[in-house]
Image (cartoon, rainbow, N blue to C red):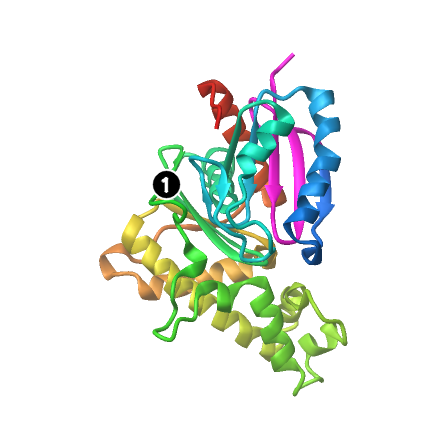
Amino acid sequence: MKPHFLGIEIGGTKLQIVVGDDEAKISDRARFTVDKALGAEGIRKQIEAGLPALMARWRPLAVGVGFGGPVDWRSGRIARSHQVEGWSDFDLGGWLRAMARVPVVVENDSNAAALAEATHGAGVGNSPVFYFNLGSGVGGGLVVDGRIYHGLPPGEAEFGHLRLDPDGATVEDRCSGWAIDRRIRAWTEPAPNGELARRIGSSVGGEARHLLAALEAKDAMAERIMAELAGDLGFALSHAVHLFHPQVIVFGGGLSLIGEPLRAAVAESLSKHVMAVFAPGPPLRLVTLAEDAVPIGALLLAHRASEKGATR
């Protein structure tokens, strides 16, 4: 029987606990919706509810975690969450070790996803691989020769917090799913007769999921929002290209479901911002692991932790 490992994804909207083998093939899963109002304590209660049965059924050798926020990967302590209150300075690694009684390694979720896409997804065969996600927040990760790049803790490839202008607006401020939702709502309210406005109706939240259909209908408002989003991302990615020179850039998250229209628009924007000698820039690819990128990355981390006999 193959050895098994446990991977946990802790995000701002969802919690996933998965079990997989030494090839990171997922065989079992528990999924929960995060209630932000319940804070970190609510998520910990969900972990306490879902983890014991999976531990008993599969007896995993180690646990890996992809956490939605900056962490000290050496100790497993959370710096903070930008989306859910109650995580600041929490010893997540120690808490999980006490519960699971196996080695535990904690990483930022974008780092975990970057590792997964570099070794099992769209970045296979390339190094460095730069990854970013466009979800409820915006994160980034860099994998060099199959290993996550770690800078001075707790921050690393903090793509979402790159400044887009001198006034302090960040990539996350302008390009996250929630930011695009707000922009769509603000722009369509004065113009309720367009395709995009008609599709979102009176619902509040998740407006960005209607962008693709509106783009296919050639809605002018959707095209304008796409142009601004792609422009911001291309400009921000040019900094990553000039600093890290990745062989490939991979992106995921909820907004990546827009697919090829967004990928092509960002690639075109990037080509306008990189130095001529590097033009048109590295290839830009959509994730292939979709919502499993972070859990698979967590499984890979758990496997490596077990091989090292890690106790952190």
| Number of numbered tags placed on the structure image | 1
Q: Secondary structure at mark 1?
A: loop
Is 14 one of the magenta-colored residues? yes
Residue 167 quadrant: bottom left
- What's the residue at 42%, 35% (across, down)? 74
Q: Is residue 172 left or right of residue 155?
A: right
Where are the magenta residues, as a range? 1-29
Q: Position of residue 30 (x, y in %)?
A: 73, 37
**Residue 308 against residue 244 in the figure, above or below:** above
Is residue 267 among what the camera can see? no
Quadrant containing the N terminus is: top right
Residue 9 quadrant: top right
Is residue 244 among what the camera can see? yes
Name the residue nearer the viewer: 264 or 189: 189
Is 139 one of the magenta-colored residues? no
Q: Position of residue 126 (x, y in %)?
A: 38, 38
Q: Is residue 112 left or right of residue 55?
A: left
**Residue 161 against residue 296 in the figure, above or below:** below
Which residue corresponds to mark 1?
Answer: 150
- What's the residue at 34%, 74% (across, down)? 166
Kind of residue at disc 1: His
Q: Position of residue 123 (x, y in %)?
A: 45, 40
Q: What main secondary structure does the magenta stretch of the protein show?
A: strand
Name the residue nearer the viewer: 232 or 126: 232
- What's the residue at 73%, 21% (across, down)? 56
Name the residue nearer the viewer: 46 or 239: 46
- What's the residue at 53%, 70% (across, down)? 226
